[in-house]
Amino acid sequence: MTQIRVARAFFVSALVGLFSLGMSRAATADEVVEWNVTGFEASATGGQNALVVSRTMTMVHLAVHDALNAIDRRYEPYLYEGRAERGAAPTAAIATAARDVLVGVIPDWGNPQQREKARSIVDSAYAGAIAKVPDGLPKDQGIAAGKAAAAATLAVRKADGSGASSQYIPGTAPGQWRPHSNPTPPNPPIADPALAAGNWPALLPQWAQVIPFTMVTPWQFRLPGPPTLASVDYARDYEEVKRVGAKNSTTRTAEQSEIARYWYEGSPQGWSRIAIVVAAARGLDRWENARLLALVNMVIADGFIAGADTRYLYNFWRPVTAIRAGDTDGNDATAADPAWETFLNTPPLPDYPSTHSVAGGAASAVLARFFGSDQIAFAMKSGPPFAGITRSFTTFSQAAQENADSRVYAGVHFRSACQDGIKLGEQIGRRAFAQHLQAYRK
């Protein structure tokens, strides 16, 4: 069983169609948002899991940002320092930058059929976008700016460690991660019977070696580690997830079950959509949307990188393993339940930290700073695999906390992994916003 096959089966939730974003192409605010939709659709269709999607979409949005700012420099570029004519067509620059990055990344992931479908999505979107721009010098100049920005992005990420080999070996001692099962039947469903039971190898351990987008190193904000097995804190976390995260929990409320399902969608997709919803309400233009989506996606990408560094350092077991083997942990307060099952499927990765929570902490920190306040109300509809749930929030930090809570309600993470994950994400988000894509001063 290959890691690609595993990734495709588990992260079916990453597939984002146009209407799962709660908008059609015709209703989107501008071309930047349209290519966000296209990029997520193509990446997931092409067999990319949430970690890989975060890298791909960060590259897309950074190239788009740099192409626009080559035409009219409102914000500091990330990589491409070139200048285009002020008359260059922004639509052509955006479409070309996004298309070239996606076409450059698609061949690295998935199987041939997935790659062909992904390429078809991108080619169709590009043909439609570029046809809207009248032929002439502005169109040619826009295409040139997009190509240059995409080329710079692809070149710097070509050997960033994402394709490195890994020698990771799971543990067998108490507290150490090892492959684990899904609930029976799996939730959400997995079509392939051979994969439905779970027990998959760790997903992309090499992600701990990927060069970050905003951090100095993957370990810049490394966390102190999970509670020790013998501690009171561990027993508290154990009992909470055992009680509320069980498949047939009698204490998990209907709302908590809804929260678990609502946030199960991949982090890059969900938090991009939050950014788009709030941006649309404020009428942001293409340059502002490009900056916003680049910032949100690159801190999520760095959250996955930092999270991989920490989780493979501590290699802490998931609740489903811990609870079934509770009689081996040396803690008298943790009673084992060999038949315990989670409410939702557990990702094939060590527990600490919850990178879902890291992503939420990072994105919420950026959003609060970008819009000048955490106190911004919004509502959003969930995407697959539990599409169509609408929830409302009064602050970005409230959404980040609920996002973290969802992993405990789903039975897939201990509380400490979620709370420490938010803290890690906030550190990444604060630093990135302060140091990248600042307003350009002439």
Image: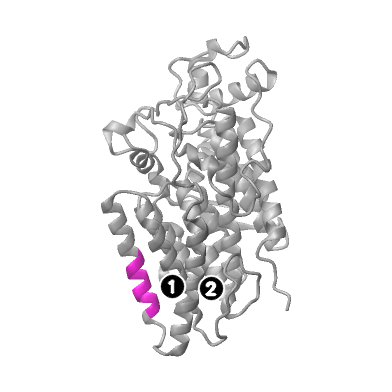
Q: Residue furthest bottom?
A: 136
Residue at position x 45%, y 36% in the image: 166
Contact between marks 2 and 1 (CB within 8 A): the answer is yes
Q: Mark 1 packing: few (<14 Cα in 10 Å), some, or many (20+)? A: many
Q: Which numbered dot is residue 154? A: none
Pointer 2 residue: 67
Side (left or right) of 285 relative to 35:
right
Relative height, residue 307 to residue 394 (above, below): above
Residue at position x 59%, y 75% in the image: 69
Q: CA distance from mark 2 to mark 1?
A: 9 Å
Nearest to N terminus: mark 2 or mark 1: 2
Residue 127 falls within the magenta-colored stretch = yes
> Can you tell which quarter of the image residue 377 is in?
bottom right
Find the magenta span and give its range: 122-130
The image shows residue 311 at horizontal and vertical percentages of 57, 33
Pointer 1 residue: 96
Side (left or right) of 371 relative to 135:
right
Relative height, residue 183 to residue 140 (above, below): above
> Residue 430 versus residue 192: which sits nearer the camera?
430
The image shows residue 136 at horizontal and vertical percentages of 42, 90
The image shows residue 219 at horizontal and vertical percentages of 64, 41
Residue at position x 61%, y 70% in the image: 288
Q: Mark 2 packing: few (<14 Cα in 10 Å), some, or many (20+)? A: many
Q: Most prominent secondary structure in the magenta stretch?
A: helix
The image shows residue 113 at horizontal and vertical percentages of 26, 53
| Secondary structure of the residue carrying numbered label 2 | helix
Relative height, residue 322 to residue 292 (above, below): above
| Secondary structure of the residue carrying numbered label 1 | helix
